[in-house]
Amino acid sequence: MTRFNFRFQKILELKENETQLAQVEMAEALKKEQAVREQSEALQTKITEAEEMKKAKEQKGIPISELRMLEGYIYQLYEQSSAANREVAAHERHVSQSQDALKAKAREEKTWGNLKEQNYAAHQKENQAAEQSFFDDLAGSRYHRLGRTGDAQ
């Protein structure tokens, strides 16, 4: 029986490596997206706290200059929040692109893997046919040999 040798094994290994690399890239993209999302949520918390502090100070009565500073701070937080939301959206797009790339790489790897399986099945079939032919020849020669000596039953 001959050993199976897939002609495109190097390509299959390359596709497997590309898939693993795409998985790593997607994991990194997800980590970055999560970090940016947490920053955005932290800004939202700061905005809520600042708004509540402003309401509390308004009820107690504060100087207009302090109120303007507080409103400026809140406005700055809203600007940062808006920028963080844009960054979250950009990271979501990057994650989506990473997912698409991973799917494409996985499809390519599966295609080459299926080709290898088909080639292996054909190899097995050829080996079985060769083995069957060998045993048929062996049985035929035995029949002729036993038939000539008179030992055939």
Image (tube, rainbow, N blue to C red):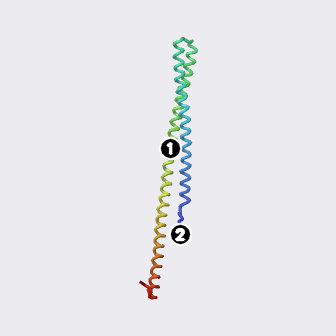
Of residue 41 and residue 96, the one placed in the foreground of this image is: 41
Question: In what element is the residue under mark 2?
Answer: loop
The residue carrying pointer 1 sits among few (fewer than 14), some (14 to 19) or many (20 or more) residues within 10 Å by Cα, namely some
Question: In what element is the residue under mark 1?
Answer: helix
**Marks 1 and 2, how far apart at CA:** 44 Å
Residue 152, image x and y in percent?
43, 84
Vertical placement of 57 versus 144: above or below? above
Q: Residue at x 53, y 12 (%)?
A: 60
Residue 92, image x and y in percent?
50, 38
Q: Which residue is mark 1?
A: 97
Residue 148, image x and y in percent?
45, 88
Q: Residue at x 56, y 42 (%)?
A: 28
Q: Residue furthest left?
A: 153
Vertical placement of 97 versus 110: above or below? above
Of residue 50 and residue 65, the one placed in the foreground of this image is: 50
Q: Which residue is mark 2?
A: 2
Q: Residue at x 54, y 22 (%)?
A: 49
First in sequence: mark 1 vs mark 2: 2
- Say which amino acid is labelled 2: Thr
